[in-house]
């Protein structure tokens, strides 16, 4: 029964099965965002998208995610360099700690930040009298984004560091380069692919962050409301169209990032 | 750590100024190295003259790579110093030594084109663009890679990559070129070809070079001189001819190709091997009459005859029974049991397998190997079981116990 006149039946069957299973789980939910969002015409969609609060939410998401990405990529580079070049007591503990935020629920992350920086928090109680308020501002959102995306860039960059041919750097040194020149001309170009994919991963994850953001931002429309919070708020208010417009933008955005990740890989790693 | 620092301090005090003769391009003076408690190099000293090629030959783990890394500044010696053209560079980091290292895997920068790789040394020295371009062009034509200038290393063959690696170091006029197992990654044919190419190139640029290899054939062909390294010390240093034909130790004799070792007793002006007498002139300080010695000779130095008549220039050492015959390309390889009968037996062979597998009667014989050129092999045919007279042309005498 496996072969009908030399035709492999299992192949089309298994592919069909895979697609069928993915339908209710992934394809249909995604599809319904687009169907619903555009069902009342593009005018309505556009109006919902250009509402001042919606535009602000998108901009705030992009800006906070951008700064979190910049920090985490630089930090990831530095941490990878230190942790793959040197062996020291406590090295593995540091690696585990850096990777830990992946396993921590985002709500817990947000709560932890509140306990540290909040008006009555461990650090916050000393800052509050000076008039410094970290929580419920854009800075709080960046801090939350940094926390939850902490291991992503590191996780992509470190393996490349580990497998990098050390003799390249030794060659550069014998040719006469300083450590800095070696890093700039030899090490960094080999990390180009890892840096770009680490950055995209971090950014994509930060833009969609909800659990920690809702705790630390204060969710104030037009001030500290990011795009995912906006979707949640509008949905609660019953403004499904407004929520849907932003949802479409975020969904398209992640498509874009992952296509870049997928197709640019070869180009970035080209020798 | 503290011990090491104080040693270096003492060293500085005791050697105030370096006064090497100008022909010495590179000197390694009394270098030793330890990793933890294990000593990997003991008191290594040698000089490389201007334009000379020295080969460090040794098995893996002999410490030869560590010597190279110490000269390059990638590793610090425990004691001793490295002198380049009269300048003590022991304390200098790799980047200030001006040494060219051709790594085993070439270590070309994968994201740079051939010309960028070659120009790298000048670029980081902030030379003018015009100067860089001119030097790169010169070097590209020297290593004959003009048409590949825009390619990336991964698009080149192993031999081409190696030439880029050499050109990349020549760009900044290195004091000495260090080659780490330069032909390890290549097939036999390319190897032989590249060896000649590199020799020719080195003669053209006249830069002293130190090669590292475990391949004895390569060492003999590449080097003006060869240093045989064993377990962190130099066994012998000399021209390929000396190393091969007059090995100073048993290790050198056996490491450089096949060697036969036969026991004998030294008499005033000859060596007694069984009933045969080999005339010798020996250093009176190292040897005295009555000493037990080892005679070392190469398979190709043995000549086999069916009669007692030996060819002029050869000396009979005994008779032997042919045990095995095999063809190895250009020559015939003959394994024989040399009969030691008679004479004073100096020492029992201490090789353990001899004791376990050989009967007491057979212990009176000694397994040796001879090779005969094809022409001789086909005109005077030998058969297994034949009794032949073994005579040798040249040989070396080593003291029986120990090398030092």
Image (tube, coloured by chain):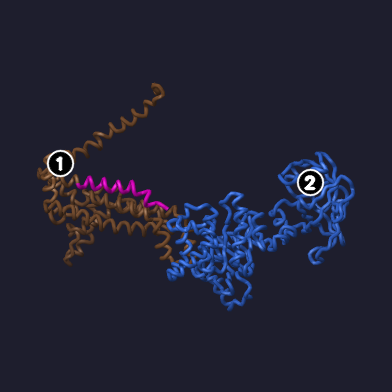
Chain colours: A brown, B blue
Q: How would you classify the magenta stretch by its main secondary structure?
A: helix
The question of residue A252 being in magenta is answered with yes
Residue that numbered label 2 is attached to: B375
Name the residue rendered at 81%, 42% in the picture: B322
Residue A244 x %, y %:
15, 44
Q: Do the dots labelled 2 and 1 sit on one chain?
A: no
Q: What stretch is highlighted in magenta?
A: A249-271
- Res B344 visible: no
State the residue at coordinates (25%, 47%). A254
Q: Is mark 1 on a helix, strand or loop?
A: helix
Outermost residue on the right side: it is B308
Q: Distance between the residues labelled 2 and 1?
A: 94 Å
Residue B230 location (% of width, % of height): 65, 58
SS state under label 2: helix
Q: Do the residues labelled 2 and 1 touch (CB within 8 Å)?
A: no
Quarter of the image for the C terminus of chain B: give it.
Answer: bottom right
The quarter of the displayed image where residue B72 is located: bottom right
Is A191 drawn above or below residue A9 in the view shown? below
Residue A38 bears which disc, if any? 1
Horizontally, residue B377 falls left or right of residue A98, namely right
Please name whichever residue, A258 or A130, is drawn nearer the observer in this view of the structure.
A258
Q: Nearer the viewer, residue B293 or B158?
A: B158
Q: Which residue lies furthest to the bottom in this view?
A: B16
Q: For the residue carrying disc 2, how many other residues have a C-alpha within 10 Å: few (<14), some (14-19), or many (20+)?
A: few
């Amino acid at each position: 029964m496996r072969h009908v006149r030399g035709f492999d039946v299992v192949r089309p069957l298994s592919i069909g099965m895979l697609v069928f299973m993915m339908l209710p789980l992934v394809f249909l939910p995604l599809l319904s965002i687009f169907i619903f969002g555009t069902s009342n015409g593009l005018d309505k969609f556009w109006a919902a998208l250009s509402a001042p609060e919606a535009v602000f939410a998108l901009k705030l998401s992009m800006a906070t995610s951008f700064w979190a990405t910049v920090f985490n990529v630089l930090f990831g580079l530095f941490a990878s360099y230190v942790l793959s070049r040197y062996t020291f007591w406590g090295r593995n503990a540091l690696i585990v700690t850096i990777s830990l935020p992946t396993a921590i629920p985002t709500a817990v992350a947000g709560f932890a930040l509140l306990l540290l920086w909040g008006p009555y928090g461990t650090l916050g109680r000393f800052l509050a009298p000076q008039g410094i308020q970290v929580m419920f501002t854009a800075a709080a959102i960046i801090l939350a984004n940094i926390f939850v995306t902490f291991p992503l860039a590191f996780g992509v960059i470190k393996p490349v560091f580990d497998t990098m041919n050390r003799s390249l750097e030794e060659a550069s040194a014998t040719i006469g380069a300083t450590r800095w020149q070696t890093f700039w001309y030899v090490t960094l170009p080999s990390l180009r692919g890892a840096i770009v994919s680490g950055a995209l991963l971090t950014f994509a994850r930060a833009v969609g962050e909800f659990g920690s953001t809702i705790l630390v931002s204060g969710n104030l429309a037009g001030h500290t409301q990011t795009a995912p919070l906006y979707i949640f708020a509008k949905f609660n208010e019953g403004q499904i169209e407004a929520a849907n417009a932003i949802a479409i933008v975020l969904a398209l955005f992640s498509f874009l990032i992952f296509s870049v990740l997928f197709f640019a890989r070869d180009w970035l790693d080209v020798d | 750590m503290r011990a090491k620092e104080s040693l270096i301090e003492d060293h500085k005090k005791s050697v105030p100024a370096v006064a090497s003769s100008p022909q010495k391009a590179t000197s390694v003076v009394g270098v030793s190295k330890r990793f933890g408690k294990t000593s990997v190099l003991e008191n290594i000293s040698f000089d490389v003259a201007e334009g000379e090629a020295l080969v460090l030959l040794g098995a893996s783990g002999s410490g030869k790579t560590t010597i190279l890394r110490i000269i390059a500044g990638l590793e610090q010696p425990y004691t001793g110093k490295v002198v380049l053209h009269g300048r003590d560079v022991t304390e200098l980091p790799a980047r200030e030594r001006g040494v060219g290292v051709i790594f085993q895997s070439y270590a070309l920068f994968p994201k740079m084109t051939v010309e960028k790789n070659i120009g790298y040394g000048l670029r980081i020295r902030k030379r003018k663009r015009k100067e860089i371009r001119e030097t790169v062009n010169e070097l590209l034509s020297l290593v004959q890679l003009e048409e590949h200038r825009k390619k990336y290393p991964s698009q080149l063959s192993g031999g081409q990559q190696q030439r880029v690696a050499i050109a990349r170091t020549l760009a900044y006029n290195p004091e000495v070129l260090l080659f780490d197992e330069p032909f390890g990654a290549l097939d036999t044919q390319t190897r032989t070809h590249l060896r000649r190419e590199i020799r020719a190139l080195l003669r053209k640029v006249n830069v002293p070079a130190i090669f590292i290899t475990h391949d004895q054939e390569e060492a003999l062909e590449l080097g003006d001189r060869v240093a045989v390294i064993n377990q962190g010390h130099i066994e012998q240093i000399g021209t390929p001819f000396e190393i091969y034909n007059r090995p100073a130790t048993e290790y050198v004799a056996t490491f450089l190709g096949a060697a036969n070792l036969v026991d004998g007793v030294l008499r005033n002006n000859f060596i007694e091997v069984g009933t045969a007498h080999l005339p010798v002139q020996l250093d009176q300080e190292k040897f005295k009459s009555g000493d037990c010695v080892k005679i070392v000779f190469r398979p190709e130095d043995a000549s086999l005859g069916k009669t007692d008549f030996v060819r002029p220039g050869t000396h009979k050492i005994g008779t032997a029974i042919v045990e095995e015959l095999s063809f190895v390309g250009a020559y015939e390889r003959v394994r024989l049991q040399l009969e030691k009968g008679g004479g004073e037996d100096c020492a029992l062979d201490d090789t353990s397998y001899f004791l376990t597998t050989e009967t007491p009667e057979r212990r009176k014989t000694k397994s040796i190997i001879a090779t005969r050129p094809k022409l001789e092999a086909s005109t005077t045919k030998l058969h297994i079981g034949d009794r032949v007279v073994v005579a040798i042309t040249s040989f070396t005498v080593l003291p029986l116990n120990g090398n030092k």
